[in-house]
Amino acid sequence: MVIVMQKHAPDTSIEHVVAELISRGFDVHRSTGSDQTILGVVGHVDTIDPREFELMDGVQEVVRVSEPFKLSSRTWKPDKTIVRARGVEIGGDKVVVMAGPCTIENEEQMFETARRVARSGAKVLRGGAYKPRTSPYAFQGMGVEGLKLLRAAGDETGMATVSEVMEISQIDKMLDYVDILQVGARNMQNFNLLAALGQVRKPILLKRGMSATIQEWLLAAEYIMAGGNYDVILCERGIRTFETYTRNTLDISAIPVLNKLSHLPVIGDPSHAVGRRDKVMPLARAVVAAGGDGLLIEVHHDPEKAVCDGPQSLYPDQFTRLMDELRIIVPAVGRSI
Amino acid sequence: MSQLNAEVELKRLRDAIDRVDEVLVKLLNQRAKYAVEIGEIKGHLSLPVYSPEREKEVLQHVEAASEGPLDGASIRRLFERIIDESRRVERESAQIKENA
């Protein structure tokens, strides 16, 4: 951390800041210029709240040099993490596509959709059993009965399963049916839930909060990892911007940024970002082209009849076409599918 | 100066710098030992490691002592680093004593 003092800051102000740093056990490197002094702070500076020093007399600016996230950073672990779930490797050479309906509705829907996406090349089956709906009057999900259908459909088609966990009390029963636990955008900063998932020994798919910065997102991952669960997959799902034509703006740039900052696998969810089926395919292609390790795509065997997010679900035939397109794109970015 | 002479002269001056550096390192270590002793005495007297007034005195003293070609600001910057390290040595030796 570097503390830049104001021009011509009085010695007493500088001494006060130095004394405070030393009393907290930090080493200070003082550099006096012709009219400005800079203090280099050495030690475990991530415990410092920079605002405390910014508010001190004579301080112009406090600049963090190191990142506040540790376990998720490339500095801590230079090699990419490969997360394994029921034989599927996420973050490795292969781009992994996760697909399935937004919500598990009934046996026919779950199995029919599972068979179609598996045939096209999906490796992980998605399906929501507990749904965080914006309205309390909307369908809230099938619960454990839905999870049983998801597991059975995954087993039949040879796919791993992913489903969203909304609260701590759901974790235990979900572990019996689900290979990857998903944390939704609305829960990205539910720190109690994140800490509880740190105790789990199954991969966590952490979606980006809709107004979360990349740093906040990585700090959320840090909560899970601090508990000893290092298998975290980051999922970009669109951020709030001023644009209203799409529901959210899929932040493609987050993918190369995260690939540099973090060793964790990064995937993209274009379905929730745009909220419209006709925009899902181009964005899915962009995620893979930008270096994403995978995709999370909503597919419904009969989207018109879907109880949730029908307009953003692909028809099975569209999904097959998307997979064919991805097979052309992945070699160009040095991957396979 | 011929090419050969210039090269010999360059080598002689670089050797001279190496010898000066050896003396400097010895002197800096001597200075650090004093700093550790001072740290112990400060601990005895319950005085803080950081004493801005004394640091100011040290800087003024060395600035005044310099006869050039390094000007006062240069000497000050160099000694700020020396003081930073002395402070660290004092703190670390105090901590070792505390933990012992």
Image (tube, coloured by chain):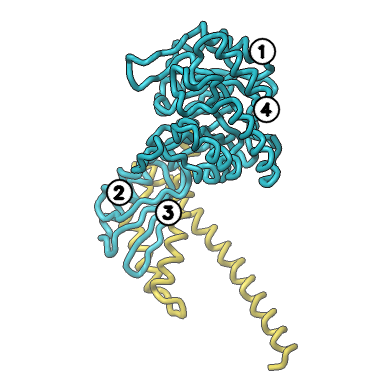
Residue B39 horizontal side relative to residue A135, left or right: right
Q: Chain of mark 1?
A: A
Mark 2 against mark 4, which lies toward the viewer?
4
Q: Secondary structure at mark 3?
A: strand
- Per the rendering, the colour in which chain B appears is yellow
Q: Secondary structure at mark 1?
A: helix
Residue A173 percent location from the top left of the image: 52, 8
Residue A75 percent location from the top left of the image: 57, 43
Label 4 to label 1: alpha-carbon separation: 15 Å
Q: Which mark is residue A155?
A: 1
Label 3 to label 4: alpha-carbon separation: 53 Å
> Within 10 angstroms of label 4, few (less than 14), some, or many (20 or more) residues?
some
Mark 1 against mark 2, which lies toward the viewer?
1
Mark 3 against mark 4, which lies toward the viewer?
4
Mark 4 against mark 1, which lies toward the viewer?
4
**Which amino acid lies under the numbered mark 1 shown in the image of this protein?**
Asp
Mark 1 against mark 3, which lies toward the viewer?
1
Label 2 belongs to which residue?
A: A54
Q: Are marks 1 and 2 on the same chain?
A: yes
Q: Which image quadrant is residue A32 in?
A: bottom left
Q: Chain of mark 3?
A: A
Q: Are marks 1 and 3 on the same chain?
A: yes
Residue B81, placed above or below residue A117: below
Give the mark nearer the N terminus: 1 vs 3. Answer: 3
**Which amino acid lies under the numbered mark 4 shown in the image of this protein?**
Gly
Q: Which mark is residue A121?
A: 4
Nearer-the-camera pick, A134 or A196: A134
